[in-house]
Image (tube, rainbow, N blue to C red):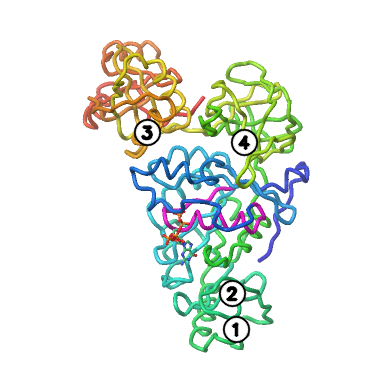
Amino acid sequence: MSQTAPVGPKMPPEIARRRTFAIISHPDAGKTTLTEKLLLFGGAIQMAGAVKARGERRRTRSDWMQIEQQRGISVTSSVMTFERNGIVYNLLDTPGHSDFSEDTYRTLSAVDAAVMVMDAAKGIESQTRKLFEVCRLRDIPIITFINKIDREAEDPLTLLDQIASDLALDLVPMAWPVGMGTDFRGVLDLMGNKILLPENGERGASFGHAEALSELADIRKIDGIDERIADRALEGVELAQGALPPFDLEAFREGHLSPVFFGSALKNFGVEQLLDALAQWAPGPLPRKATQRTVEPGEDQVTGFVFKVQANMDPNHRDRVAFVRLCSGRFKRGMKLLHVRDNKPMTVSSPTFFFGQGRETADEAYAGDIIGVPNHGTLRVGDTLTEKENLKFTGIPNFAPELLRRVVIQDAMKAKQLNRALDDLAEEGIVQVFTPVAGGRQILGVVGQLQFEVLQSRVANEYGVPVTLEQSPFELARWISADDPAKLQKFVDAHRGEIATDRDGALVFLAESAWMLKYKGEKFPDIKFAALRERG
Ligand code: G4P
């Protein structure tokens, strides 16, 4: 069961020891709590509780922004780096709320593995399924963490069965709960043949110590575990191991099989096992596809791509930070890199790393790491940086928005600030901005309503421009293209009132209804209407 990840012959050890991953979950499953505990066990924070404002459920619409400001590390850092037992972990934060899915999708383009957290009482929920599908599209290996086993929960076998059939994924349990809810007595670590017990044998208390077992049945001899609870756990393990496939590292790496841990983030059960699993099985930095070729992490040349941009991270400095995932090589501060889209060199003189609550200047970074590059808007999501090669990394999508609104400025003198604000927030992925070719007010597009509220609040607070949003005559936006440029031009000329450009200058058709979109699609078979567009 304990196959260790092979290290590629060309991968320098400094690179091979990196694990870059994200946690995917449905709101309330325990992502914030688990993040906090991973950082705690990874030594990045001194005290649990430092990851503030847990839970999407508290993030009501009106107080989202304040919460955002108070949240501290889980939002402002976006990347959390810590080192444990010689492994460097880069944990990329993903906004859990479904309204921010675009940002999440982009973040998933920068990881090599994911941890899927579920509530043991609920199993798979809508957001978990959606995010899982994105991971599957990218063949991202997934470790499953079934959380909250200290509470009343579904029977573990039923849960495994539900997840496996729902996601068409092979599962291999690496841990097993001994009782759940009021019966909870500990967790069997099936890899290490040991049991994790609460401190002082207290029921429901936090993880205290692990006790080695010469065989699993020895749990019967442990104080406080009565026959009924022990029998049930042992029977469960036997049934699961009989019915489920053995662990297969290759199948895991290909995204077909997921090792499963049962634990309690709140009570510290299973957190270290999860870190060990990431160290042992999750891949180090993976090769990344560019239009021209595939880039191997062990190559000498430094390459990377921007997967996220955040404006005003520090409100006092109005800075703008591009988050760059390094794909190959060893980066050094002060390096001159080629900004491929602009075909211009840029000196990266003050790159940042994100440690726990703080930022630190990055003197050196390796493939797999995320560095923050402060800039004044030259770097955009999807941009590639190299030492000199003309490369373009692929796989950063834009999704067609699901809601459209027209932006109305209250003070016409502030049009310039508004444009700057919209440009910044569009770059962050908070909103998409469409400019009608025939003139008139800009149209804003989002995936979820909450984004509009964040937008209004940020435009007012950070740029001093109060705006209102009014209904747009359009419901849907699709990127248009055609093999024959003359046909595309003809379509644009005939529909000028319904054509806009996005901030990259790409043409967009705005449809007043789904029916109209379908109708145009049938009437103009040479025009492609796309709901997804690659950035850059
Ligand atoms: P999220 O980021 O995925 O939205 O979830 P979060 O960690 O905020 O957890 C949601 C709620 O579930 C919190 O409770 C948290 O304490 C609780 N929780 C997380 N992990 C566990 C666990 O392993 N066992 C148990 N029993 N509870 C867990 P809350 O009461 O809503 O918030 P709080 O008052 O604890 O902050």
Residue 38 located within the stretch drawn in magenta: yes
Q: Are marks 3 and 2 in contact (CB under 8 Å)?
A: no
Q: Is residue 527 above or below residue 250?
A: above
Proximity of marks 2 and 1: CB atoms separated by less than 8 Å: yes
The answer to whether the residue labelled 3 contacts the one labelled 4, judged by CB atoms less than 8 Å apart, is no
- C-alpha separation, residue under disc 3 versus residue under disc 4: 29 Å
Give the residues in magenta. Answer: 21-44
Lower sequence index among marks 1 and 3: 1
Q: Position of residue 265 (x, y in %)?
A: 53, 63
Say few, some or many: other residues with alpha carbon within 10 Å of mark 1 (under 14 / 14 to 19 / 20 or more): many
The answer to if 180 sits in the magenta stretch is: no
Label 2 sits on what residue type? Leu
- Report helix, strand or loop for mark 3: helix
Instruction: Specify the amino acid type for callout 1.
Output: Ile
Q: Which mark is residue 188?
A: 2
Q: Which residue is mark 4?
A: 325
Q: Determine which quarter of the picture holds residue 409.
A: top left
From mark 4 to mark 1, how far is it between C-alphas? 45 Å
| Rendered view: 529 above or below 499 | below
The answer to whether the residue labelled 2 contacts the one labelled 4, judged by CB atoms less than 8 Å apart, is no
Name the side, left or right, on which 473 lies relative to 84: left
Disc 3: which residue: 457
**Gap between marks 2 and 1, in whole Å?**
9 Å
Q: Which residue is mark 1?
A: 219
The kind of residue tagged 4 is Arg
